[in-house]
Image: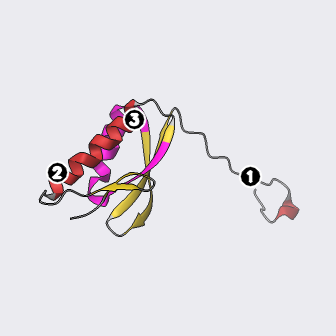
Amino acid sequence: MRRIHVENGLSLRFPGRDEDFNEGVEIGILATLMSSGQRGFTHWVSSANVEQAREMASQMGYRLTAGAINGDLTEVILRTGRARPTLTLVHSRPDAGQNVA
């Protein structure tokens, strides 16, 4: 019997229920958070549930990024909107140590 993270300081356990039930509760919590219209949030889910969460997030207009892993739990970061481009600093001066021809 494992704990299901609801929010900071609040988790649930369901004695006598199997892991499929626990994963369903986790996905239900994520669906509720996404349907609330938040632009972004983080949440802990079972590592076995990450791919299902990613598929649902995509269908609901969110990007899911897996973060820290703690035992059998993975922190997922969900954001809406377009991802910002990654900027890279490029030096064009020879004295910068990057001799580009």
- Label disc, if present, on residue 89 of the rendered structure: 1
Residue 35 in which image quadrant: top left
**Residue 30 x/y as whole percent:** 35, 42
**Residue farthest to the bottom, as pictured:** 71
Distance in Å between CA atoms under marks 2 and 3 = 20 Å
The numbered mark, 2 or 3, whose residue comes first in the sequence reads 2
**Residue 24 x/y as whole percent:** 21, 46
Looking at the rendered structure, the secondary structure element under dot 1 is loop
- Label disc, if present, on residue 29 of the rendered structure: none
Distance in Å between CA atoms under marks 2 and 1 = 48 Å
Q: Mark 3 highlights which residue? A: 34
Residue under the point 32% across and 45% down: 53
Check disc 3 and give the amino acid type.
Answer: Met
- Label disc, if present, on residue 21 of the rendered structure: 2
How would you rate the neighbour count of disc 2 (Cα within 10 Å): few for under 14, some for 14-19, many for 20 or more? few
Q: Which residues are magenta?
A: 41-62
